[in-house]
Image: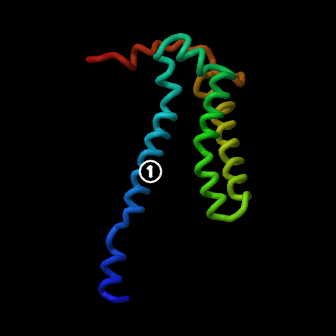
Amino acid sequence: MTQTGMAMAAKPSRTSWLRRRWNAATGIVGVVVGLAPHVLHHVGVLAGTALVAGSGGIALFGALGLVLSVPVLLRLRRKFGNWTAPAIGLAVFTAMFALSTWVIGPAISGSGDSGPAPSTVDHSSHHETS
């Protein structure tokens, strides 16, 4: 490789800068969507608890997860050239969402049924200021 070629290979491209920005932005969106259920219950009775409790919350966050996974599924389609990899990705997403919804969620909330238990925890204790 020539010296000019080595210098060009070491210089970061504009594409890598844009890719880093895009990855950071999608990471931030992921954090916001992950924190949404906890934050929404502080907004108010109707906007928080009623929206994210039970079947409505499951449907809302399942749909959001599916919509937000479309770019990744399309990228998998382009990378592998068939629909097998996106189908596997969608199956993994569905399995993890179901595990979180019907196993981990009830275990954390202490309910034995498939829906979230009514909250009797005093949430003011983790919002106290010194």
Q: Is residue 115 above or below residue 15?
A: above
Q: Is residue 118 above or below residue 16?
A: above
Q: Position of residue 62 (x, y in %)?
A: 65, 34
The quarter of the image holding the N terminus is bottom left
Task: Report which quarter residue 65 is drawn in.
Answer: top right
Residue 84 vs residue 3, the one in the foreground: 3
Q: Which residue is rendered at x = 37% and y = 66% of the image?
A: 13
Task: Report which quarter residue 52 is drawn in.
Answer: top right
Q: Which residue is mark 1?
A: 22
Q: How many marks?
A: 1
Q: Which residue is rendered at x = 49% and y = 25% of the image?
A: 38
Q: Is residue 54 above or below residue 15?
A: above
> Callout 1 environment at 10 Å: few (<14), some (14 to 19), or many (20+)?
few
Q: Which residue is rendered at x = 56% and y = 14% of the image?
A: 119
The quarter of the image holding the C terminus is top left
* 93 sits left or right of 126 in the view: right
Q: Secondary structure at mark 1?
A: helix
